[in-house]
Amino acid sequence: MTSARPAGPTAVPGEQVACEMFIAGEWTPAATGETFTASSPATGAVIGSVAQGDRTDAQRAIEAARAHPAVDGDRIAVAGSSQGGALSLAVAALRDDVIAALPEVPFLCDMRRATQLTDTEPYQEIARYLKVHRDQVETAFRTLSFVDLALLASRATAPALFSVGLLDTICPPSTVYAAYNAYGGPKQIIEYAYNDHEGGGEFHEVAKVSWLRSLLDGDATERD
């Protein structure tokens, strides 16, 4: 239920655009009003700003979906990759009314370990901060623990399908497994042995549809 596009007229090539989220039939900024800068992967040039949605916006999207007449409000699943994977875990942990969670290569899991395993952004931002603020290590990680999905995952109860890229340098495999091992509901994980942060790509899309179909078919049988 969330997406992004230029807010306003169609973007002109070479011009920067501001993108919002599409929730409840409207283009809307993030609940916090925060944005992040988007750069071209080809040139590195800044191409615009994007609404920085968080778990509040994800829950807004669920409420919008539930209110739609074409949606069965009792059969809503949450899914996402990287930061979206983190948001799907967060929503599954905070709500008891989602039928399934499908986090792919989820971000923000076991952040302390991540800072010790990878030299890529954004975890190195934490390392750089602590390199200067040597006396703030425990304070920093205690603060981060309130949003660490490896801890929040234990609150989730919906069935879950995880994915992990075993060569992932952005969300190291052991951090994904930290969330997976802590997850409180029935769970399954698919490993992609030779993939980095892209994970399973289109192969995993097929796996998700198959897994979700089996789950929903079982739910329909139980209802009957």
Image (cartoon, grey):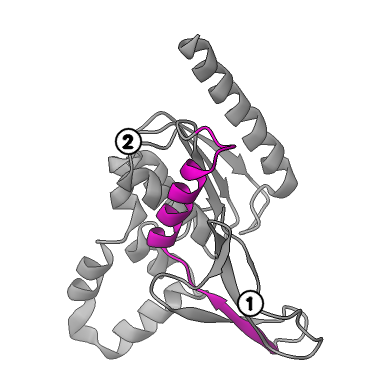
Note whether residue 104 is visible: no
Work out whether residue 172 or residue 221 is closer to the camera in this orientation and state it: 221
Tell me which segment is drawn in magenta: 45-72
Mark 2 vs mark 1: in front: 1
- The residue labelled by disc 2 is 184
- The residue labelled by disc 1 is 7
Amino acid type of the residue that numbered disc 1 sits on in the rendered structure = Ala
Amino acid type of the residue that numbered disc 2 sits on in the rendered structure = Gly
**Lateral position of residue 75 relative to residue 217, left or right:** left
Mark 2 to mark 1: distance in Å? 39 Å
Q: Residues within 10 Å of mark 1 (few under 14, many from 20)?
A: some
Work out whether residue 204 or residue 54 is closer to the camera in this orientation and state it: 54
The percent position of residue 210, horizontal first and vertical second, equals: 66, 29
**Lateral position of residue 155 relative to residue 175, left or right:** left
Work out whether residue 207 or residue 110 is closer to the camera in this orientation and state it: 207
Element type where label 2 sits in the image:
loop
Work out whether residue 139 or residue 38 is closer to the camera in this orientation and state it: 38
Q: Residue at x 76, y 79 (%)?
A: 10
**Lateral position of residue 45 relative to residue 78, left or right:** right
**Lateral position of residue 74 relative to residue 82, left or right:** left
